[in-house]
Every structure is written in structure tokens, then in C-alpha cells.
Image (tube, rainbow, N blue to C red):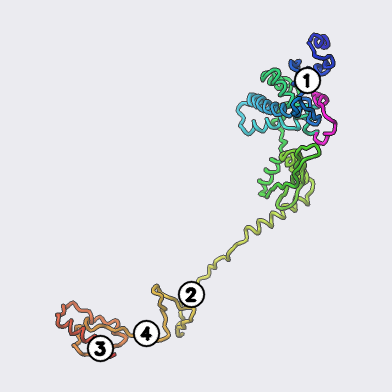
């Protein structure tokens, strides 16, 4: 019956009957413009060029299909999980369109067998099937529109081939697992790039290493930073589970680091009360040089020589007769008899000033 349907289709060449049959088995409908699908199955290793000399391969359709897949799968996930948060929806969509998932779909659907390549790109086979799947979605979009892509993904892929619930609740992000473990155990985690270059086919290649508390974990090689780090994290998690000496070394390094960080930078102040300011009875006070201090006027409180006696101007001493010298004693500095409330006459003030001036000259 299938052959009769194909015979009724106007084919440019009879040799394309097999390609039409294969695409019908994959998509569930016949292509209208077969050139889109031929281009979607053409790997860049073929190195074909058009009349203008530009390379002809599936990379442009792969770019288009990738964008269409994100929109369609995002729509399906949004409708399938009502009420779920944005993080859950994003994570689920990422699992459904990641390379591993698309590669498995390409193999199960038979897309990988239809890819045209030079056969020497097996080192990059982790990309070839998934890229062709995305390019095929791009071809369907150009040939039949968005609704055809939605029907293909919703009724053919996410109903018959993938259990969306199992994918959503299955944790496959090894990097997130390792980061969560390190945060819970307060372990320092770093990623170091060991190598970045290209393989023999010109595809980018990355090699990242996991470092935990300064101890080297495992490294992983991939065709993207994410793929490289995912593999490195997966191998490191396995090593943490299977090698007790590795996890012991990690926590020993953590203990040394935290010990250094927690060491005090200053000595703890003493709580002992200092009472050396009390002089025992019967002992003479000894003033040491280190006990001397300066007052706010930068003058030493203690002096080795006797303090100079302060002069008191006779003009403030009303009990003293003019011309009479007063005997100066140490107690005179604090004699309050110089202070009087009686008002002095002008003659007394002038006489006292002259006497004081005469006394300073004689000294």
C-alpha cells in the first residue's frame, strides 16, 4: 500500500523513492520539498559547494531547528506541568533537547543511517546524530510550518518515544550534583581548563578538570565547556563514592584550610586586674622612668629637680605694704590671703606695679 502511495507522488527521480519512504516512517508525512530534507542530512564533512562556491551542509538548518525545538518543547513542557516553577521547566526542557537525548532519538528513528558524510568524522559522532535531528526539524519548519513541527514533537516524539515525566524527575546534571554536595559540606570547588583546541575535523574541543580543596579530581573532554565539565563532574562523583582515600584527602585539606583561616591574628587580652598603683605601707614610692607620662600640655608630671616657686604679683596682695618684700614659701602658692574684695585705689595699684617691676629687676 505504501508503494502505491509513493507511486502516485510525482518524484523528480525514481531513485528518491527510498528516501521518501524513510522520511515518511520518521515524520509520519511525505515531504513537499525534498531539497530541504536532503540538505538536513548532509554533514559538513562532505564539503560540497554551490554554484557561488559557498559550502553546502546542514549547519544553517541545524541552527534553525535548534531555535524551533526550544520554542516547541518549552510550550509542551509549560502545558504538561501546570503550576511548576520556571527553574523546573527550564531544567526539563534542557534534558529533552540536550545532545544525549537527540542522539538517541536520531538512532532510534533511523536518522543516523540517512546522514551523508565522508565516514571519517566518527570522532565527532556525539554531535552528528543530534545535529541532523535539529536540522530535520528545521527542514520540516520550512517545508510545512510550525504546526507540523509541533505535531511531530508532540505526537511522535514526546508521546511514543519519550516519557516526559520520567525525564523531568530524573537528575542528570552531574555538575549541579557536585556543586550542591560541595556547598552542603562547605568544600571549595573549582574548574580548571587543561586544554582548548580543535580536533582533526576542525570541531572545537575542551578539556576541564575538577579541583576540590586544591586536590585534583577527574577531567573530562567534550565538544563544549558544558559537556567537558559534566563528564569531569560525573567521574569525580564516582571517585568520591568509590575511593575513600580521595574523600579523606579532600576533608583533610579542608580542615587545614579552615584551621588557618580561624587562627587568631592577635593575642587574647588578659583579664587579670592590675593593682600596682597601690603602694604598700612603709615603702617609699619609686617613680620609674617608664611610669612618667605627659599631660595635655606636653609637660612631664614628675620632675627630677625641685619645682620653681611661683611668683605672686604684689598688686593682688592688699595686706602687703609698698616696698616690703614678702617671704616666699611653698605654701604661698596656695595662700588665699592675696584675694580680697576691697577695691584698691589708683595710687595703690600704681605703687604695687612699680614695686613689682623694681623687684623683678633686682632679682
Q: Which residue is nearer to you in this view: 159 or 143?
A: 143
Answer with the quarter of the image where residue 62 lies: top right
Mark toward the start of the polypeptide (3 vs 4): 4
Among the two numbered marks 1 and 4 on one chain, the one whose residue lies closer to the N terminus: 1
Query: Disc 1 and disc 4: Cα gap in Å?
Result: 114 Å
Task: Quote the CA–CA distance across marks 1 and 3.
Answer: 128 Å
Quarter occupied by the C terminus: bottom left
Tell me residue 139's x, y (percent). 72, 22
**Dividing the picture into quarters, in which one does residue 154 lie?**
top right
Is 111 contained in the magenta span? yes
| Rendered image: mark on residue 26 | 1
| Relative horizontal placement of residue 270, taking residue 342 as reference (left or right) | right
* Magenta span: 109-124
Question: Which residue is drawn at the image coordinates 82% and 34% (left, top)?
Answer: 121
Task: Give the answer, above or below, for where 173 lies relative to 277.
Answer: above
Task: Give the mark nearer the N terminus: 1 vs 3.
Answer: 1
Frontmost of labels 3 and 2 is 3
**In x, y percent, where is residue 125?**
81, 33
Q: Nearer the viewer, mark 1 or mark 4?
A: 1
The N terminus lies in quadrant: top right
The disc at residue 359 is 3
Q: Which residue is mark 4?
A: 307
Q: Earlier in the sequence, mark 1 or mark 2?
A: 1
Q: Of label 3 and label 2, which has the lower sequence position?
A: 2
What whole-number distance in Å separates the C-alpha atoms at marks 3 and 2? 49 Å
Amino acid at each position: 500500500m505504501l508503494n502505491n502511495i509513493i507511486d502516485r507522488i510525482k518524484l523528480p527521480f525514481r531513485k528518491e523513492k527510498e528516501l521518501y519512504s524513510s522520511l515518511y516512517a520518521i515524520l509520519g508525512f511525505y515531504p513537499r520539498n525534498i531539497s530541504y530534507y536532503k540538505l538536513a542530512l548532509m554533514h559538513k564533512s562532505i564539503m560540497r559547494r554551490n554554484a557561488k562556491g559557498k559550502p553546502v551542509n546542514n549547519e544553517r538548518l541545524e541552527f534553525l531547528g535548534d531555535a524551533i525545538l526550544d520554542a516547541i518543547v518549552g510550550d509542551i513542557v509549560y502545558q504538561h506541568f501546570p503550576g511548576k516553577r520556571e527553574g523546573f521547566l527550564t531544567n526539563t526542557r534542557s534534558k529533552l533537547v540536550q545532545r544525549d537525548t537527540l542522539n538517541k532519538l536520531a538512532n532510534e528513528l533511523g536518522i543516523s543511517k540517512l546522514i551523508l558524510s565522508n565516514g571519517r568524522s566518527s570522532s565527532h559522532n556525539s554531535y552528528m546524530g543530534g545535529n541532523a535531528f535539529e536540522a530535520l526539524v528545521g527542514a520540516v519548519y520550512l517545508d510545512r510550518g510550525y504546526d507540523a513541527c509541533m505535531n511531530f514533537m508532540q505526537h511522535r516524539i514526546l508521546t511514543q518515544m519519550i516519557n516526559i515525566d520520567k525525564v523531568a524527575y530524573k537528575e542528570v546534571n552531574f555538575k549541579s550534583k557536585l556543586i550542591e554536595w560541595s556547598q552542603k559540606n562547605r568544600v571549595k570547588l573549582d574548574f580548571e581548563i587543561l586544554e582548548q583546541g580543535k580536533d582533526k575535523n576542525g570541531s572545537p574541543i575542551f578539556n576541564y578538570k575538577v579541583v576540590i580543596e586544591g586536590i585534583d579530581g577527574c577531567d573530562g573532554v567534550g565538544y563544549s565547556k558544558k559537556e567537558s565539565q559534566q563528564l569531569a563532574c560525573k567521574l569525580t562523583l564516582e571517585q568520591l563514592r568509590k575511593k575513600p582515600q580521595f574523600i579523606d584527602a579532600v576533608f583533610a585539606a579542608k580542615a587545614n584550610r579552615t584551621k588557618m583561616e580561624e587562627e587568631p591574628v592577635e593575642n587574647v587580652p588578659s583579664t587579670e586586674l592590675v593593682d600596682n598603683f597601690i603602694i604598700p605601707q612603709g615603702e617609699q614610692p619609686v617613680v620609674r622612668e617608664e611610669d612618667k607620662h605627659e599631660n595635655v600640655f606636653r609637660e612631664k608630671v614628675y620632675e627630677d629637680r625641685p619645682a620653681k616657686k611661683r611668683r605672686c604679683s604684689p598688686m593682688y596682695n592688699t595686706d602687703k605694704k609698698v616696698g616690703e618684700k614678702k617671704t616666699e614659701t611653698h605654701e604661698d602658692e596656695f595662700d588665699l590671703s592675696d584675694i580680697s574684695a576691697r577695691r584698691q585705689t589708683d595710687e595703690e595699684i600704681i605703687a604695687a606695679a612699680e614695686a613689682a617691676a623694681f623687684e623683678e629687676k633686682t632679682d
